[in-house]
Amino acid sequence: MPDLMISLWEGFQFYWDDICYLTAQHLQIVAVSGLLALLVALPLGVWMSRPANQRYAMMSMQVLNVGQAIPKLALLALAMSLIGIGSGAAIFGLWVATLLPVVVNTYEGLRTVPPHLVEAAEAMGMTPRETLWKVELPNAMNVIFAGIRTALAINVGTAPLAFLVGGGGLGELIFTGIDLNDFGMMFTGAVLTAGLAIIVDLSFGVIQRLTVSRGLRLSGRH
């Protein structure tokens, strides 16, 4: 253990400039692909959960499962073939890999809202849109956030592979360290990636608690 800590400390000192630059690249790739995934996955999950669209839900899920089933490296290689080398391919590949957990949890979260809450909202004269925003979404928020946190953890952990398609990021430290047999470089990149995943998860955990408590207050549940 002391040897590992020494290697990590030396790696931080020696590669500090690279660490700052590559961490910023890594976060940019994760942020852009994650945001694009949320913009697509959340509305898609809501659309699939509507009773009129049930016959399309399983078909949509199967299409998304294909993207999840493809190994992440193969997915990035396919993205590179379509888009070319660079951050665009990395963002596209990570976007596809991030969609499924958010869609599934949004769909299941809305489907498991107690029916009596929806019926009560309808009896009060709420429109379907008002019922969705004021009753269903606040009560499904914990499940939806669980999907978001899972998706972002996958995203941060997969992002080092972006280096292999010219996308940059902390994968440069990991894979170059492996190539050069430089344990300090490799270990530094791995620890930073794990640290970013933990920070992102904890940050969204805080956002989840604040959002859920506020949503439940607005919906009248305490």
Image (tube, grey):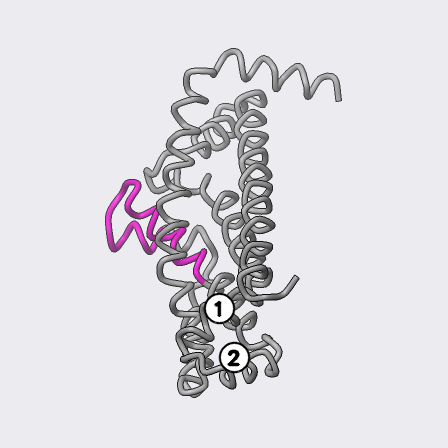
Residue 50's image quarter?
bottom left
| Residue in the picture at 47% in, 15% down | 16
Q: Is residue 34 above or below residue 178?
A: below
Q: Position of residue 57 (x, y in %)?
A: 44, 80
Q: Position of residue 32 (x, y in %)?
A: 35, 45
Q: Is 150 positioned to the left or the right of 52 in the image? A: right
Q: Say the numbered circle drawn on residue 55.
A: none
Foreground residue among 182 and 4? 4
- Per the image, is 93 magenta? yes
| Residue in the picture at 24% in, 47% down | 84
Residue 169's image quarter?
top left
Q: Position of residue 47 (x, y in %)?
A: 40, 75
Q: Dots 2 and 1: beta carbons under 8 Å?
A: yes
Q: Is 71 positioned to the left or the right of 216 in the image? A: left
Three-letter residue code for mark 1 = Lys
In this figure, which residue is indicated by the disc labeled 2? Answer: 121
Q: Secondary structure at mark 2?
A: helix
Three-letter residue code for mark 2 = Ala
Q: Is 122 positioned to the left or the right of 195 in the image? A: left
In this figure, which residue is indicated by the disc labeled 1? Answer: 134
Q: Position of residue 139 (x, y in %)?
A: 58, 67
The crowd level at tag 1 (other Cα within 10 Å; few <14, some 14-19, many 20+) is some
Q: CA distance from mark 2 to mark 1?
A: 9 Å
| Residue in the picture at 34% in, 47% down | 91
Q: Secondary structure at mark 1?
A: helix
- Per the image, is 82 magenta? yes
